[in-house]
Amino acid sequence: MSQSFLAHRIVTLKPSGIRKFFDIVATMKDVISLGIGEPDFDTPDPILQAGIRSLQRGETHYTSNSGILELRVELARHLEDLYQVTYDPVSEIIITVGVSEALYLAMTAILNPGEEVLIPTPCFVAYQAEVTLAGGVPVEIPSRVQDNFQPNLEALESAITLRTRAILIGYPNNPTGAIATRETLMEVLRMAQEHDLVVISDEIYDRLVYGVPHVCFASLPGAWERTLTLGGFSKDYAMTGWRIGYIAGPAETMSGLLRIHQYTIMSAPTPAQAAGLEALRTGEPYVRGMLAEYDRRRQRIVGGLNHLGLPTFEPHGAFYAFPDIRATGMDDELFAQKLLEEERVAVVPGSAFGAGGGGFVRCSYATTYEQIEEALQRIENFMRRYG
Ligand SMILES: Cc1ncc(COP(=O)(O)O)c(C=O)c1O
């Protein structure tokens, strides 16, 4: 049996609950998918053209391991302008193959075998797996809808042990759409300081916030020196397929991350880096345009779901609504399965995103307004039977 060649930590690594679901969706016709975790927009044209020009100029070679310096300089300026957080482009920023690679680097660099990482859940499906892959132990801290899905601070603090190495947070949050307030983040910082923990902050949805400011964790007083900031282009600039992102942190830590990146990746895709540079330079109007459209859809879907008897708290970030489906008497897996089979609407069961997600489903509004209208109509039919 081929499985005997696999390491123990890989044998026990569960496949993503999302994939399983999408394999079923792929076999069906006439499905409206609210399951997608990526922008429905194509990459804005100037960004696309910059990538094409890069290839035409013959930029088909490796770049510096850390990424092209011009991009790192622009990124440092961007973070300074937006969040007043300062990173040295030479020694404190690495351009990565998406936030996915940034997570891998962060975990591999900081974890000794058996060390624990506290993760407020529900969260992006890769967090727990990345910790496990790096030889660490993920410790899930369920968030609650009554706290607007902010991290549960009491539970977080009481989960800290001598083995705890880091806290991994991701706000605006996938799958809930929650943001974390400055006060909450200050408390997370206090705990990290008291117990000398690293904070890994995945801020990939930083620009997708609705009427509230995004708080960059590293910008909190005293946070910078113990924070790794992960960010990207995939969501804000509709660039998932380009595979580009970044990680920023104190030089000493970053030199360790760079060694891993050197040996595993070499450098992020070269044309994607040219496109990323263009995104930072001229992408702002496009970000605002997409944000306005997401907001219109957000209001429609949140209002619609609430109206249909599926209580949905107001998401202030990302592009997900996270309705509570418990009133139907079904669990989230069964709800998602029946909704797909009977009405051909795909949503993702909340339990796929870890503890605290059960009883909810993730509905992405990164799909057209018309599709959302149609999906709500179908959910209404469904709720007539099960509501
Ligand atoms: C919270 C979060 N972090 C990271 C990623 C991965 O992003 P990237 O495309 O930059 O690898 C995703 C993608 O869904 C995400 O939702």
Image (spheres, grey):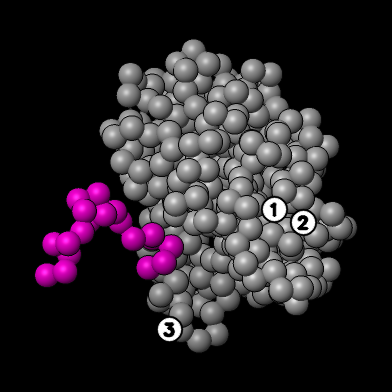
The quadrant holding residue 131 is top left
Q: Residue 10's mark? A: none
Q: Main secondary structure of the magenta part?
A: helix
* Residue 39: x %, y % from top left: 66, 64
The residues colored magenta run: 1-20
Report the residue at 44% width, 58% height from top: 349
Q: Is residue 73 above or below residue 83?
A: below
Report the residue at 11% width, 70% height from top: 1
Please give left or right for residue 236 compared with residue 144 in the image: right
* Residue 82: x %, y % from top left: 80, 38
In the foreground, 293 or 219: 219
Q: Nearer the viewer, mark 1 or mark 2?
A: 1
- Secondary structure of the residue carrying tag 3 is loop
Q: Is residue 192 above or below residue 294?
A: above
Q: Nearer the viewer, mark 1 or mark 3?
A: 1
On the question of residue 259 being in view, the answer is: yes
The answer to which of marks 3 and 2 sits earlier in the sequence is 3
- Secondary structure of the residue carrying tag 2 is helix
In the foreground, 192 or 94: 94
Residue identifier under label 2: 277
Q: Are discs 1 and 2 less than 8 Å apart at CB?
A: yes
Residue identifier under label 1: 68
